[in-house]
Amino acid sequence: MYIAMNITKNIHEWLLAILPETAASIVEMTLIALVYLAFFAIAGLFLVLLERKVAAWFQLRLGPNRVGFHGLMQTIADALKLVSKELTVTIKADKFLYNLAPYFVIVTALMALSLFPFSKELQAFDINIGIFFLIAISSIGVIGILLAGWSSNNKFAMIGAMRSGVQTISYELSVGLSLMTMVLMTGSLQLSEIVEVQKHGWLIVQGHIPAIIAFMIYMIAGTAETNRAPFDLVEAESELGAGFHTEYSGMKFAYFFLAEFINMFIISAIATTVFFGGYLSPFGITESIPLLGVFWFLAKTLVLIFLMMWFRWTFPRLRIDQLLVLEWKYLLPLNLMNLVLMALIVLLKLTIKF
Amino acid sequence: MEKIVFYILALLMIVFAIASVTSRKMLRSVVYLLFVLIGIAGIYFLIDYNFLAAIQLTIYAGGIIVLVIFSVLLVHHIEMELELAKISKQILTGVLCLFGLGVFLATIYSYDFKVVENYKTTTVADIGSGLLSYDRGGFILPFEVISILLLAAMIGAIIIGKGDKLTQKDETI
């Protein structure tokens, strides 16, 4: 559970020197949580900025360019505005659940974030069932959305929440199965080991055809799980207002908004870890500098995030029946067949290894 | 340290379990139940049984609770409250619960427990090969029986869900 890098070692020793062991470990855990929380906030804010810039680029606009250098401080200013806004509540809402709902979404996103190996040594929680735990955690986040929709006592919010529930439950299957397809090759669920296996070529290269199919299914299902366009029926503006967070204002709305972007980061980060070698550099060019792993990890993740933004501005929104047909009639059978194909390939040792 | 975490978890579970059965708002009691289930997952983590903990989170918290919330969303309006039962029924339930608790505590305290030093976590590979092995201690038969049961349940659900449409030819879909 400890980050074994020099700076943290120093902090660890210093804490042990001044505090008893239990207190020291609690302080350490708190510090790690704070670091991740800070990362969470900063990454969320800059992903919002990136989304706006990419959107502007696709639509031949300039995007935010007034606050700071090329608008770099825009989202920070927005966050400050949101913090200072009044938190409105509808009188007939169920206050307890209404206030609880954003935290479900935030906490699950934060927990998922702690599992990723950003570099060989920079990983907060290397659990032996890593990927399975990620799937388990991501299935809880939807409860927050359902609660938010129901407790705001608003019909549009409720319909949005129901749509989100249907969508997430369906597409979770595809996410899980496509990741399981890759686990067949690694033989381990632990994220750090999955990355180590890829020293002989990234898994998408090792598993060639079934791996590429699995990756495509994963990206489609992952986009659906984050409720982003073209699967954004949850908050389809033309039909539902803002969907499940219609009644939320100020910082509580910002929680949902941030969590959506962090979920996008998480989906991309899982894809990076499982398909594209995580922190490993292409062809091992920077293997001697382990710290550069963070750079490679973030670079690959950002490319995948860009891909998801590209989806958003390319495809029109699906109807709810099209959404369900896509999952249950196409992706799921394809996924099951793909799983068998991958098992055969691993059994016959047809994987490509360098 | 572990003791403190255990007591915190146990306290939370008991409090939320009581809150879950006493709350008169349906969705609130579902959420309290969710906290109890997450607490159980926490206990599994505490005894280093990660796989079971993750299963607990996926099946109970992620699957069953989401389905329960779904059905509550469909049938229950936010302003409705659950009715209070009759006094006689309340007393009867209370007595039955106390009796159950008594049997439970009597059973627990009639044995003395030895603390087992268990540092070996069960790996997923062990569980997988255990499920599919037909040697001694293998679970292939229950595994297959459960899969047939699930298949039967699924077919039943489809038949109930389709209703009349199964017999008529439907061109609209």
Image (tube, rainbow, N blue to C red):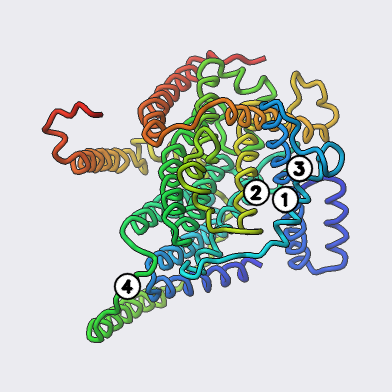
Q: Quadrant of residue A49?
A: top right
Q: Do the residues at discs 2 and 4 belong to one chain? A: no
Q: Do the residues at discs 4 and 3 belong to one chain? A: no
Q: Earlier in the sequence, mark 1 or mark 3?
A: 1
What residue does disc 4 label? B82
Helix, strand or loop at disc 1? Answer: helix
Which residue shows up at 20% across the image and 42% down it?
Answer: B156
Binning the other alpha carbons within 10 Å of mark 4 as few (below 14), some (14 to 19) or many (20 upward) gives: few
Q: Earlier in the sequence, mark 2 or mark 1?
A: 1
Helix, strand or loop at disc 4? Answer: loop
The residues tagged by marks 2 and 4 sit, at their Cα atoms, a distance apart of: 36 Å
What residue does disc 1 label? A41
What residue does disc 3 label? A122
What residue does disc 2 label? A258
The residues tagged by marks 2 and 1 sit, at their Cα atoms, a distance apart of: 8 Å
Amino acid type, label 3: Leu
The residues tagged by marks 4 and 3 sit, at their Cα atoms, a distance apart of: 50 Å
